[in-house]
Amino acid sequence: MLERDVFAKFSLKVDKFRSQKRLVLGNGLENESLPYMVWSAGQREFVPLLLGFYWLMPPSAVSRRGDINWVVLEELEMGLHPKAISVALLLVFELLKRGYKVCLSTHSTQVLDAMWALKHLKEHKAKPEVLLDIFSAPTTANMIKMAEAVMRKHVRVHYFDRESGITRDISQLDPDSEATGNFGWGGLSEFSGRANDAVARAVAKREKITRMTFQKAVDKIPQLNGAFKAGMEALRSRDASHINAEDTRKICGSIDLDAAYTPVDPHGNRWDYGIAYQHINRRKEVVYWVETHTADTSEFKVVIRKARWLLNWLKADGRPAATLERDIYWVASGATKLSLGAPQRRQMAEVGLQYAGSVLRIRNRR
């Protein structure tokens, strides 16, 4: 894995030049090697770290070096490709297996993604092979033993708040939490989140026309005859609990799109609800198209298909409603197993879909 993901099919070796020895990257050919000065920045940063790993891992019956208990690693991701970061994390796991305690400082969302995954795999008593699969690591006997050992360890994550100078424990790594540092994981995923939301809003194509309300739009759609309800009465009670409006009096009405289209599209991936809200800084109502669905990576394709169904509906039967300003939200109906910054969230943004967590909070001011 080192040769494949860190050294690009080269290997680290000692080259003898006259009376001197030097580290080079070789490809097996006697006269072809790359000296230190032409290595990538990531390789130059990583090799001293790798030598430190090797020193801490004696190839003898003794698994640890002397009386060393703690290993402190600062930003092991420096200059490395994401695949190389995965290799570095596997080396960290080997340290844990050997009984070391490891303290990592990082600016990498990938490191937090790994800790988030490890937390959930432990909670659900997953097999060690599942952890190895995340890192594209071989499932040899030694690797499985390492994964088993790591899944018995305890992980704590702390966020250093630069503004207040306070250190906060965010070990839950809960994207639904409103606690400082939890949402956005200490700011590491904030840019990605803002980028995804911006693209999602652009894709949503929020257009306005004069004198149009959500109720009037619904009344123009034959299949929604009788579907418009006051407030959030169209929502099932278990789903309504996931919507928190700052002023419920400003909820202009709602529809159960899923129920209305079940008779004519029983096998389609139908969208759930539409909820209209009158914000104090908007002249027209804003429609929140809401899908309450399990927030699990395995459900991505289903929710994406639902979002596409909604967009196609807004271009066809739902054209009157398409003229209103809108946002499209996926609201978690249960436990969240969706990692922030995951590539799937970019796919969500491409169809105008935003993730609200377990509760969609609608503020008075938009």
Image: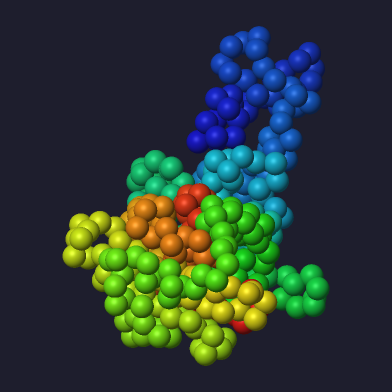
Is 48 left, or right, of 235 in this rendering?
right
The C terminus, quarter of image: bottom right
Relative image position of residue 29 (x, y in whole percent): 59, 12
Q: Is residue 259 above or below residue 19?
A: below
> Toward the viewer: 268 or 177?
268
- What's the residue at 56%, 59% (across, down)? 206
Q: Residue furthest front?
A: 211
> Toward the viewer: 192 or 258?
258
Q: Quadrant of residue 314?
A: bottom left
- What's the residue at 36%, 44% (across, down)? 139
Relative image position of residue 326 (x, y in whole percent): 52, 65
Model colouring: rainbow
Whether residue 67 can be seen here: no
> Toward the viewer: 331 or 167?
331
Number of callouts:
0
Relative image position of residue 307 (x, y in whole percent): 40, 57
Whether residue 194 can be seen here: yes
Is 304 left, or right, of 325 in this rendering?
left
Q: Quadrant of residue 223?
A: bottom left
Relative image position of residue 333 (x, y in whole percent): 38, 74
Is 30 left, or right, of 130 in this rendering?
right
- What's the residue at 18%, 65% (across, down)? 263
Q: Is residue 283 above or below residue 251?
A: above
